[in-house]
Image (cartoon, rainbow, N blue to C red):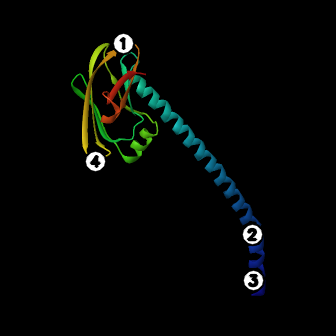
């Protein structure tokens, strides 16, 4: 029995370095696998970015592309709740603002609210904003403008302000 015990002990002692080597190899393989996974993630993100660019070029060719951007005038006397934009009488887009979005706009941020295709020529642009004044009263202001689309891509900025800002609560201009 003691020789059987000795043989078992020798076998265990002989196998111990093999286990350590196997664990080291497994650790190296795991690190190598982790590196490969990170590389694949990077490749996937790069491909997704390229696909988004291609999609935008296909959906919005440069000769018909129109982009509209929203900003808020430097005035804290109102809270913007929502914006609605119509082009040629058809609803182009509308947006209801969250607290974080309003905070970003008040700090000078700009929101790309619409990208679409329009043929060359003049188009009617109707902008409606809904909000609250500092005293808690609701206000609603609308403006109609002409969007002159040429052959090149068109980018327009829409600056919004409360009633205390003057006669132009909504201003539209080329960017």
In the rendered image, the vertical position of residue 12 relative to residue 4, given as above or below: above
Mark identifier at residue 16: 2
Which label's residue is closer to the chain start, 1 or 4? 4
Indicate which label's residue lies in the foreground, 3 or 4.
4
Indicate which label's residue lies in the foreground, 1 or 4.
4
**Distance CA(mark 3)–CA(mark 4):** 89 Å
Density class for disc 2 (Cα within 10 Å; few <14, some 14-19, many ≥20) is few
| Residue drawn at x 23%, y 22% as measured from the top left | 88
Mark identifier at residue 5: 3
**Distance CA(mark 1)–CA(mark 3):** 93 Å
Instruction: Please give the residue where the numbered disc 4 appears in the rendered image.
Output: 136
Q: Are marks 1 and 3 in contact (CB under 8 Å)?
A: no
Q: Are marks 1 and 2 in contact (CB under 8 Å)?
A: no
> Which of 119/21 is in front?
119
Residue 162 visible from this viewpoint? no
**Distance CA(mark 2)–CA(mark 3):** 17 Å
Instruction: Please give the residue where the numbered disc 1 appears in the rendered image.
Output: 150
Q: Are marks 1 and 4 in contact (CB under 8 Å)?
A: no
Which label's residue is closer to the chain start, 3 or 4? 3
> Which of 108/37 is in front?
108
- On the image, the x and y values in percent for residue 90 come to 22, 26
> Which of 169/90 is in front?
169
Density class for disc 1 (Cα within 10 Å; few <14, some 14-19, many ≥20) is some
Indicate which label's residue lies in the foreground, 1 or 2.
1
Quadrant of residue 91 within the rendered picture: top left
The kind of secondary structure element at disc 1 is loop
**Distance CA(mark 4)–CA(mark 2):** 77 Å
- On the image, the x and y values in percent for residue 17 come to 77, 66
């Amino acid at each position: 029995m003691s020789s059987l015990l000795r043989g078992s002990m020798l076998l265990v002692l002989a196998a111990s370095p093999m286990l350590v080597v196997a664990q080291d190899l497994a650790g190296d393989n795991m690190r190598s696998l982790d590196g490969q996974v990170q590389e694949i993630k990077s490749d996937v993100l790069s491909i997704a970015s390229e696909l988004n660019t291609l999609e935008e070029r296909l959906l919005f060719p440069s000769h018909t592309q129109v982009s509209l951007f929203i900003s808020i005038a430097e005035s804290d006397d109102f809270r913007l709740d929502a914006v609605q934009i119509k082009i040629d009488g058809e609803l182009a887009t509308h947006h209801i603002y969250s607290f974080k979005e309003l905070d970003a706009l008040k700090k000078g941020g700009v929101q790309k609210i619409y990208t679409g295709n329009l043929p060359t020529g003049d188009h009617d642009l109707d902008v409606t904003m809904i909000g609250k004044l500092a005293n808690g009263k609701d206000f609603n202001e609308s403006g109609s403008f002409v969007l002159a689309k040429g052959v090149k891509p068109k980018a327009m900025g829409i600056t919004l302000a409360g009633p205390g800002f003057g006669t132009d609560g909504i201003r539209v201009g080329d960017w």
